Amino acid sequence: MKKIAVLIYPNFSLYEITCLTEAMMWFEQKVDIFASSQLPIRSEDGFQIIADKTLDEFSSEDYSCIILPGMMIPFDALFDPKLIDFLCQLKGKNILIGAISAAPMLLAKAGLLDDVHFTSGIWEEICQTLPFIPHQNILHKPLVKDKNIITAVGFAFREFAEEIIRTLGIDDCKNGLFRGVYKEFSEQEMIHYMGEENLKQFMQEYESYQTQNNV
């Protein structure tokens, strides 16, 4: 039986994926945690976690799905060359990829969203400013599935878990554990702006990481 891989990186969001990982336990699916190293990684809410394996130990033949949690502060993950190189190598592989909240930013930097429709919890100004994010491919919905990639905004963590489980064929999600998307959202409700000052601060930090990493 193939396993589920969860990627973690500094400031990752636990709550966005624990609904899914808990369900995997119910369905007796093995989950392995991967990171660039096995040094302790602190989540955005302060938990420290050590990955089971490093990215160098990943074998695509052993896994049916890779899950990427979001993060409020994306810079350490965004400028982690091991992580981005790992994601680049997934292009063209027959493996399900799930990314929630800001995690699609990592997929975009790796070129995995160039021809894929997606959604995310990324501020609209950032989507329009960072050149590697294919803004034309964004669908302003709680959850989007296109090809082998499932993306969701952070508040749709239950729907995200349900779609991953259904797509993997683990369960039909009709047992009452999940409720599906509970309302229709207009496009305007799904576009979130951070404001000029917040964008300025974000870009200053982004450019500082660029300089530090010689990108």
Image (cartoon, helix red, strand yellow):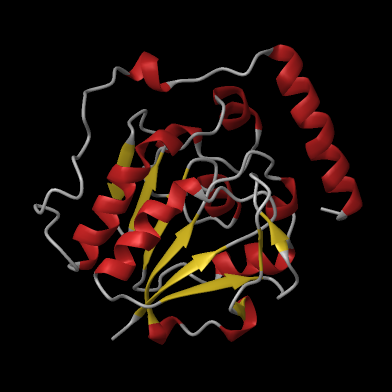
**Residue sitting at 66 percent across and 13 percent down?**
195
Q: Is residue 138 left or right of residue 205?
A: left
In the image, is residue 109 above or below residue 25? above
- Residue 128's image quarter? top right
Q: Is residue 136 above or below residue 62?
A: above
User: Is 58 left, or right, of 199 in this rendering?
Assistant: left
Tell me if 37 is positioned left or right of 86 in this view.
right
Foreground of the two, 192 or 180: 180
**With respect to residue 164, does 39 lie above or below?**
below
**Vertical placement of 147 versus 86: above or below?**
above
Q: Of 77 and 116, which appears nearest the observer? A: 77
Q: Disc count in the image?
A: 0
The residue sitting at 73% across, 60% down in the picture is: 80
Q: Residue 131 appears at what percent x and percent y? A: 64, 38
User: Which residue occupies 38% across, 14% down?
Assistant: 188
Front-most of 52 and 204? 52
Counting from the top left corner in percent of width and height, residue 34 is at 57, 72
Looking at the rendered image, the quarter that the N terminus falls into is: bottom left
Q: Position of residue 25 (x, y in %)?
A: 32, 69
Q: Is residue 138 left or right of 104 when viewed as pictured?
A: left
The image quarter containing residue 190 is top left
Q: Residue furthest right?
A: 212
Residue at 37% over, 43% down: 157
Q: Position of residue 31 (x, y in %)?
A: 42, 74
